[in-house]
Image (spheres, helix red, strand yellow):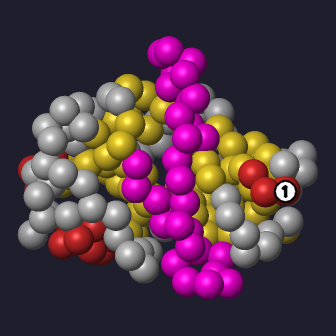
Amino acid sequence: MILRITFIAALTFAALPTFAADTDSAVIFGQIRLTGGNTMPMAYRLTARNIDTGKVERINLSKREPGSLIYDFAESLPAGKYYLLNMVAPNYDSEFRIGDAKSPFEVKEGATVYIGTWNLKLGIPTTTYTIDYDIDEISLFAKANPTRDRTKFMVGAPGKQAISLQTQ
């Protein structure tokens, strides 16, 4: 089942990251797909801002395969409400603004939160994006991370509280 939400305004796994079953750590995961505009297959990272504290967190991306414009991410973050802020190409000193507090996601303590596949068309000054939620991505991530508590897998849909999912 795929739910699509479209916004105007910033993930499939080659080698899925694994995380310990530490109940205090929350993990977000998903994908970035570059769909046009100012795109090149290079090293990128995301930044996310905590809405309550203002702290900016770095989210590392890994390419699906060499030359690909599909990037996976999985990162441990403190619990809180966030939004994706920028897509950064550090080797080229380039930064693309993605979102703002109008498209937040929630990270609950100890949860594993899928924030979707972000289809980005990078542009200056405007980046457009859509977000897809593919339930199969949660199953793939759960299989690659069997020590994560499956009862704490969630979807962090923008603008809504995380919805608990029971994965098989």
In the image: residue 83, left or right of residue 157:
right
Residue annotated with mark 1: 92
* Percent x, y of residue 108: 27, 33
Q: Is residue 11 above or below residue 97?
A: below
Q: Is residue 82 above or below residue 117?
A: above
Tell me the quadrant of the picture where the C terminus can be found. bottom left
The three-letter amino acid code for the residue at tag 1 is: Tyr
**Residue 48 within the magenta-colored segment of the rendering:** yes
In the image: residue 152, left or right of residue 25:
left
**Of helix, strand and loop, which one carries label 1?**
helix
Q: Which residue is located at x 50 percent, y 25 percent?
A: 50
Q: Which residue is located at x 67 percent, y 59 percent?
A: 44
* Percent x, y of residue 120: 68, 62
Q: Which residue is located at x 28 percent, y 67 percent?
A: 141
Residue pushed farthest top? Answer: 53
Q: Would residue 126 be visible to someone looking at this image?
A: yes
In the image: residue 111, left or right of residue 37:
left
Q: Residues within 10 Å of mark 1 (few under 14, many from 20)?
A: few
Q: Quadrant of residue 1?
A: bottom left
Q: Which residue is located at x 53 percent, y 34 percent?
A: 57
In-front residue for pair 45/131:
45
**Residue 110 within the magenta-colored segment of the rendering:** no
Residue pushed farthest right? Answer: 124
Residue pushed farthest front? Answer: 91
In the image: residue 14, left or right of residue 163:
right
Q: Which residues are magenta?
A: 47-75
